Amino acid sequence: MYKLRVFSPNSSCAPLRNMILPKRILLRLGSTTPLISKFKYIELNSIDGIRKSANKILMKKCFDEARIHHSEWINSVKENNIIEFFKEHKIIIAKHKHSSKGNDIYYIDTMEKMIDFLDNQNFKEFVFEKYYFFPQEYRVHVDVNNGCFYACKKVLKEDADVEWHKHANNSVFVLAMNPEKRPACWDAMIEDCQKIMKNMKLDIICFDVLCSNNEFIIVESNTAPCLANNGINYYCNHLNKYFKNR
């Protein structure tokens, strides 16, 4: 029997290292550190896939290749291209290619804001997306072969000062494991997540997804999610289910 090896920059994932499994398994959660070992390991999540997921420009290109539901977007070295994109969509979101936890992300709804952004930011390092006002947002944890094994709904806090973007500082995560309370598009949504994972060569990661009735938009992939007690329990149960007796 062997302890699960976990490579991750996220300290909340550390309790997973206490798992005992019958095979040598390495789970990468956001880490691109190479494995150096004389033993052979089953490696979950490729280094290349993690690099693509961590860079929003590369991530969006993978979304395009997988032909899944996600927002219209642009990355360009030319200001005029971005201005034309803004004129077409009226409201857009600018995300730095390495933005995370609600940082380096901007809501742009006027030409004045657009010009100010282009004048004061290195816009070549940003992804610009059409803004979708979909009322529901989920974080779904997905196994590329076995589908969703853990899901939460993001709910804005009463004192949230920003409402157009839900993140860890202005929202709470409510467990969403009851199939009867999930949106009608749930199965199609998870299928799209699995398509992306196959494209990126990833095995177990999570996604942020916007929903409205029977429509959805995959917002982004996340290979290093923050895992509270619930998350640790669901990850342990899932890994036990598929590796304990193999």
Image: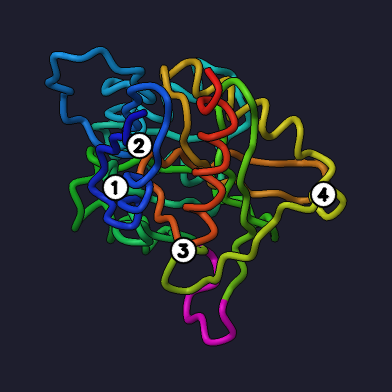
Q: Which residue in the rendered view is the most extreme toward the bottom?
A: 159
Residue beneath disc 4:
213
Q: Are discs 1 and 2 less than 8 Å apart at CB?
A: yes
Q: Measure how far apart labels 1 and 2 are at the Cα level.
A: 8 Å
Residue beneath disc 3:
167
Q: Nearer the viewer, residue 66 or 110?
A: 66
Mark in the foreground, 1 or 4: 4
Q: Three-letter amino acid code at disc 2?
A: Lys
In the image, residue 162 lies in the stretch drawn in magenta: yes
Indicate which disc residue 96 carries: 1
* First of labels 1, 3 by sequence position: 1
* First of labels 4, 2 by sequence position: 2
Image coordinates of residue 50 in percent, x first then y, are 32, 29
Indicate which disc residue 56 carries: 2
Q: Nearer the viewer, residue 217 or 91?
A: 217
Secondary structure at numbered mark 4: loop
Instruction: Name the image quarter holding the N terminus.
Output: top left
Q: Three-letter amino acid code at disc 1?
A: His
Image coordinates of residue 170 in percent, x first then y, are 47, 74
